[in-house]
Image: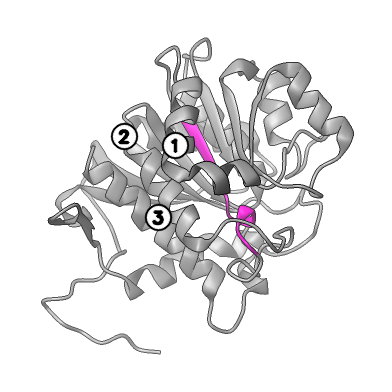
């Protein structure tokens, strides 16, 4: 459907900038081939770009009306074959990280979290932190979209004491994996905890733990942490998950912090969305929430 044109209502997306540093960048990381549930998450970056122009970049912050359009925004395109060439993906993402104050990586399944987090930490592994908002722990053995947190800890040296996992759901993880993260010293904040304490308090705690040594923080926003009614295109979303508003709050809340250099959006299968495209639209709005968070730093 063609979108209307109004010079007083500029649309989001189609971001480009001259060579050099930018405030806000997006990059597509279309991982899909190692998914436990086969699908077409590789189609999602393009689908999100297509939806972004349905929205503006204006937002309210207190009594002020602001816009992300005052920032330099750039779309770095898609990483080529991130499943087959992880080292190449890390190099490409590292280049985008080096040019951006905040980079949002649009997946792709949760396998993208490894190359994005590795690129974000650079040579600061000793102080880097990791925050996930996800119904699942993602500490399975092997290499898949179910293993990024384990791989970052065991294979890439992320300190588990600076890993915080938020919105972990009942009936979505095994006893063995729950024990594994507890034994490592990972901080687990359950879905019930989020409901009881609220997003702002959880964001504050997570940043304090992950950023305790002042290093770069990568944030993984797994859209399947949301309730299935708002994220039907996430194969593993379950009833009772986060609301769309809560996920948007997490995106903006984390993007406000100077230590957060990268955010990824994962686990949306564009080929499985509803006719109204609600999951893709939520993902696009999370991109814009991150832009808003950066704008008010």
Look at 63% across and 53% down and name the residue there. 225
Question: Which of the 4 image quarters holds residue 115?
Answer: top right
**Mark-to-mark CA distance, 1 and 2:** 31 Å
Q: Quadrant of the C terminus?
A: top left
Q: In the image shown, does 208 or 49 lie closer to the viewer?
A: 208
- For label 1, the crowd category at 10 Å Cα-Cα, with few meaning under 14, some 14 to 19 and many 20 or more, is few
Nearest to N terminus: mark 1 or mark 2: 2
Most extreme residue toward the front, as rendered? 196
Q: Residues within 10 Å of mark 3 (few under 14, many from 20)?
A: many
User: Looking at the image, which is closer to me, 186 or 156?
Assistant: 186
Residues shaded magenta: 218-227
- Magenta stretch encompasses residue 180: no
Q: Which residue is mark 2?
A: 99
Residue under numbered circle 1: 201
Disc nearer the start of the sequence (3/1) = 1
Observer-side mark, 3 or 2, equals: 3
Q: Residue at x 37, y 67 (%)?
A: 52
State the image coordinates of residue 231 (x, y, percent, origin top left). 61, 66
Q: Secondary structure at mark 3?
A: helix
CA distance for labels 3 and 1 = 22 Å
Q: Is residue 55 above or below residue 266?
A: below
Secondary-structure class at tag 2: helix
The residue indicated by pointer 3 is: 287
Q: Is residue 141 visible?
A: no
Q: In the drawing, does residue 94 fall left or right of residue 185? A: left
Q: Does label 3 or label 2 sit earlier along the sequence?
A: 2
Which quadrant of the view contains residue 149?
Answer: top right
Vertical side of 145 occupied by 108: above or below: below
Q: Nearer the viewer, mark 3 or mark 1?
A: 1
Contact, mark 3 vs mark 1 (Cβ under 8 Å): no
Disc sitting over residue 145 in the figure: none
Q: Residue 122 location in percent, x, y?
A: 47, 20
């Amino acid at each position: 459907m063609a979108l209307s044109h109004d010079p007083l209502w500029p649309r989001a997306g189609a971001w480009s900038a001259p060579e050099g540093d930018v405030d806000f960048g997006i990059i597509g990381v279309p991982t899909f081939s190692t998914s436990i549930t086969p699908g077409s998450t590789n189609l999602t970056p393009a689908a999100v770009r297509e939806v972004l122009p349905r929205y503006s970049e204006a937002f309210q912050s207190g009594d002020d009306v602001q816009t992300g359009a005052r920032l330099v925004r750039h779309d770095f395109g898609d990483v080529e074959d991130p499943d087959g060439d992880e080292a190449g993906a890390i190099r490409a993402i590292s280049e985008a990280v080096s040019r951006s104050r905040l980079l949002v990586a649009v997946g792709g399944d949760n396998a993208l979290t490894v190359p994005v987090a590795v690129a974000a930490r650079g040579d600061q592994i000793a102080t880097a932190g990791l925050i996930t908002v996800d119904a699942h722990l993602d500490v399975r053995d092997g290499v898949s979209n179910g293993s990024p947190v384990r791989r970052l800890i065991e294979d890439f040296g992320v300190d588990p004491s600076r890993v915080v996992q938020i919105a972990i759901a009942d009936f979505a993880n095994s006893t063995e994996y729950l024990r594994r993260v507890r034994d490592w010293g990972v901080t687990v904040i359950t879905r019930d905890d989020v409901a009881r304490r609220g997003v702002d308090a959880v964001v504050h705690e997570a940043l304090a733990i992950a950023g305790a040594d002042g290093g770069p923080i990568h944030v993984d926003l797994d859209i399947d942490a949301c309730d299935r009614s708002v994220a039907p295109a996430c194969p593993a979303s379950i009833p009772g998950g986060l609301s769309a508003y809560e996920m948007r709050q997490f995106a903006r809340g984390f993007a406000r912090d100077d230590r957060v250099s990268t955010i990824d959006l994962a686990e949306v299968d564009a080929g499985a969305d509803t006719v109204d495209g609600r999951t893709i639209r939520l993902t696009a709005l999370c991109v814009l929430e991150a832009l808003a968070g950066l704008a008010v730093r």
